Image: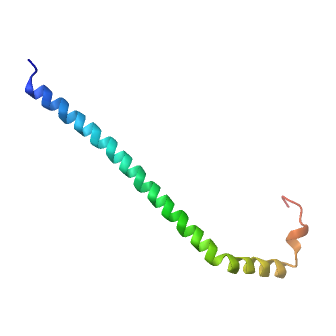
Amino acid sequence: MLNPFVALTTFVAFAQDRLRKEEKGATAVEYGLMVGLIAVVIIVAVTALGDQLGTLFETITGKLGGAAEGAPAGS
């Protein structure tokens, strides 16, 4: 006959292993949600500031006198 202590120990070890795996899955879901939220924030920020950034870069290019346009790559 099976020793009750051995059966209980086996059950507890199985339950702990199962809980660890479930926590890893929950953590992965949480990280996935955070990454998705960060991506949405970046998309909204770029969309909202896109025109202003374009204007800023055009102003900088104009003040440089277009020097960057004729420069060879790596110079």
Looking at the image, which is closer to me, 28 or 75? 28
Q: In the figure, is residue 33 to the left or right of 71?
A: left
Give me the residue at 38% from left, 46% from top. 25
> Where residue 54 appears, x then y in whole percent?
73, 77
> Where residue 59 appears, x then y in whole percent?
78, 82
Question: What is the basis of the colouring in this image?
Answer: rainbow
Quarter of the image for residue 17 reads top left
Looking at the image, which is closer to me, 40 or 6? 40
Q: In the figure, is residue 26 to the left or right of 13?
A: right
Q: Quadrant of the C terminus?
A: bottom right
Quarter of the image for residue 69 reads bottom right
Give me the residue at 40% from left, 56% from top. 30
Q: Quick one: which residue is furthest to the top in this view?
A: 1
Give me the residue at 22% from left, 34% from top. 13
When the figure is inspected, residue 8 is found, relative to residue 25, above or below; the finding is above
Looking at the image, which is closer to me, 28 or 59? 28
